Image: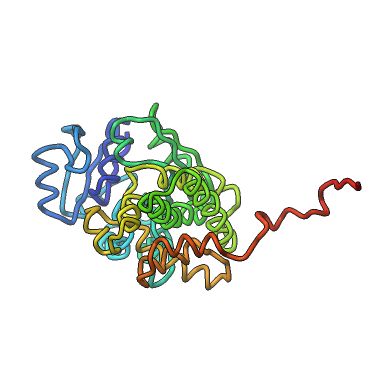
């Protein structure tokens, strides 16, 4: 049994706390909101995960030092926009070598840092790792079989995290590619917004398939330019997470995109969804990174114009369809294939 502190009481943090408690671990959940802590203590349920009954053995606190004290593992599950300030609160109570697993997804739009890079900057004594993949909180909390990947700087840490989270309904793979895992998990949210917009416009499966396929091409090009590995983007935190986020109504990014496709503004869509829409925050960062690394990302570009420049969703789709003619894969050369003379 491990002692685990969950830093963040959103739906994902609560779903993972439920999983880890069922795995036999001692779990304490921290929230910055006193009212949220009170609700969790009184009901042992969570408003965004109806039907969930949290074990009575779980503890809840608004005191971050209590959630972190003497813990074998810490899990950061706060929205990306709050990661830096939460890390600053964590630093005084984090011992040397403390394993901190980030499960949030996003890129800071001011610094263009991934969330693990923020944690390492703010808590240099921590051993920071990540966990990501196609994993909606709504399904994990119901025990629906799910598979993720954990990335760490060393094999021992990755395998420790794997053993902590693994169960008959939650399978975990390991990887050394922390950067690739985080980029896949963050950038797919922007593509999911585009997929939602297409749904809101009334387009069909053909359009969705095109966005997923060309979306992973954009993510992979940028990710590899930044140092991520091709295999990662072909895996759970790449194409796997992209598929589930573009296709599921559990996805807040897709739901926000649907509303935008129907004519809502970005602000109206976020208010309607009532949850943090990570793709909106990652969109600006993704566009800035594409310019920094000189990587064409036409879908990301059009999403930004719709979100922040007032462009109509229909016009954005039209521009994507009428771009200059291209070959599908620049790595495939005609000369490498057999040709027949007539």
Residue 305: x and y in percent read 41, 69
Asked if 63 appears above or below 166 in the picture, the reply is: below
Res. 231 in view = yes
Which residue: 68% across, 57% down? 327
Residue 44: x and y in percent read 14, 37
Which residue: 44% across, 36% down? 147
User: With 16 as the anchor, is 182 left or right in this view?
Assistant: right
Quarter of the figure with residue 324:
bottom right
Tally of numbered discs: 0
Asked if 190 appears above or below 199 in the picture, the reply is: below
Quarter of the figure with residue 95:
bottom left
Residue at the extreme top: 168
Quarter of the figure with residue 133:
top left
How are the colours assigned in the image? rainbow
Residue 317: x and y in percent read 46, 60
Residue 128: x and y in percent read 42, 54
Which residue: 47% across, 43% down? 205
User: With 30 as the anchor, is 79 left or right in this view?
Assistant: right
User: With 222 as the anchor, is 98 left or right in this view?
Assistant: left
Q: Nearer the viewer, residue 157 or 144?
A: 144
Q: Quadrant of the N terminus?
A: top left
Q: Nearer the viewer, residue 302 or 23?
A: 302
């Amino acid at each position: 049994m491990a002692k685990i502190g969950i830093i963040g009481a959103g739906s994902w943090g609560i779903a993972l706390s439920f999983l880890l408690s069922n795995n036999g671990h001692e779990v304490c959940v921290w929230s910055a909101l006193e009212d949220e802590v009170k609700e969790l203590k009184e009901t042992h349920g969570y408003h965004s995960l109806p039907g969930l009954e949290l074990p009575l053995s779980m503890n809840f606190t608004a005191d971050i030092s209590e959630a972190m004290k003497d813990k074998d593992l810490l899990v950061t599950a706060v929205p990306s926009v709050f990661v830096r300030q939460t890390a600053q609160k964590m630093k005084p109570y984090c011992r040397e070598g403390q394993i901190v697993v980030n499960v949030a997804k996003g890129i800071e739009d001011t610094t263009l840092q991934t969330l693990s890079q923020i944690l390492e900057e703010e808590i240099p004594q921590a051993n920071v790792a990540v966990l990501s993949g196609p994993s909606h909180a709504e399904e994990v909390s119901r025990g629906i079989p799910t598979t993720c990947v954990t990335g760490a700087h060393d094999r021992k840490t990755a395998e420790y995290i794997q053993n902590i989270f693994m169960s008959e309904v939650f399978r975990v793979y390991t990887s050394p590619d922390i950067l690739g895992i985080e980029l896949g998990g963050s950038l797919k949210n922007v593509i999911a917004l585009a997929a939602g917009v297409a749904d809101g416009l009334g387009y069909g499966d053909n359009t969705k398939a095109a966005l997923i396929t060309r979306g992973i091409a954009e993510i992979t090009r940028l990710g590899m330019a930044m140092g991520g590995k091709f295999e990662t983007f072909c895996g759970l935190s790449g194409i796997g997470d992209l598929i589930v986020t573009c296709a599921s109504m559990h996805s807040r990014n897709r739901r926000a995109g649907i509303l935008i496709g129907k004519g809502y503004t970005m602000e109206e869509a976020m208010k309607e969804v009532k949850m943090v829409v990570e793709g909106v925050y990652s969109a600006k960062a993704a566009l800035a990174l594409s310019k920094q690394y000189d990587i064409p990302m036409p879908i990301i570009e059009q999403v930004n114009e719709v979100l922040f420049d007032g462009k109509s969703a229909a016009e954005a789709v039209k521009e994507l369809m009428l771009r200059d003619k291209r070959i599908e894969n620049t790595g495939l050369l005609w000369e490498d294939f057999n040709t027949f003379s007539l």
